[in-house]
Amino acid sequence: MNALIDTCVIIDALQGREPFREDAEKLFLAAANMRCTAYITAKSVTDIYYLMHRAFHNNADIKKALGNLFTLFELLDTAGLDCRKALLSQIQDYEDAVMVESAIRMELDCIVTRNIRDFAGCPIPVYTPDKFLQKIAPDE
């Protein structure tokens, strides 16, 4: 399954934010074990850098963490067309609408976020990290 991972989930794992850390870390592990192909947007990378720098103030460690992210997650570029289409989207938050349009253009299967309500009206499935992990769990 190809999933676009929202910035909040990445930050939950990197900053150990409770009570969200465990599911976010499990999602990282699922990507590492190739149970899914996980994507982050290029825009998310700059947001992740900013949030990590604000929290830790260590440029070298943050760049190392980003390098590690790039081994687990595919990078999804945002196209101008995504920005234009987002203006017509039912998604209220423009930044989220751009992310949705990028996922649709790349024919991804779903979006994973903790903020399900922000994606009301999304034309592709949207899962919380725990629901996504259940969906990709190996058959037992």
Image (cartoon, rainbow, N blue to C red):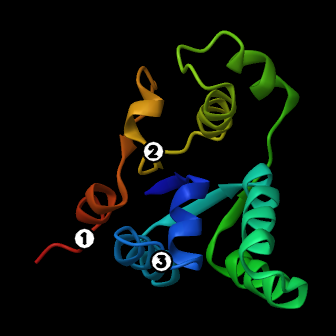
Q: Please report whichever mark, 2 or 1, sits nearer to the chain's N-terminal start.
A: 2
Q: Which residue is drawn at 89% across and 89% down?
A: 60
Q: Which residue is drawn at 39% across and 32% down?
A: 117
- Amino acid type, callout 1: Ala
> Can you give x and y, in whole percent of width and height, for residue 20 in the image?
38, 67
> Can you give x and y, in whole percent of width and height, for residue 31 in the image?
50, 75
Q: In this view, does 104 lie to the left or right of 33?
A: right
Q: How many labels does the image show?
A: 3
Quarter of the figure with the C terminus = bottom left
Q: Residue 110 carries which label?
A: 2
Do residues under tags 1 and 3 come within 8 Å of each other at their CB atoms?
A: no
Quarter of the figure with the N terminus = bottom left
> Can you give x and y, in whole percent of width and height, for residue 73 in the image?
64, 69
Dot 1 lies on which element? Answer: loop
- Amino acid type, callout 2: Cys
Residue 139's image quarter?
A: bottom left
- Amino acid type, callout 3: Met
Which residue is label 3 attached to? 34
Q: Please report whichever mark, 1 or 3, sits nearer to the chain's N-terminal start.
A: 3
Q: How far apart are marks 2 and 1 (CA)?
A: 15 Å
Q: Distance between the residues labelled 2 and 3?
A: 16 Å
Which residue is label 1 attached to? 137
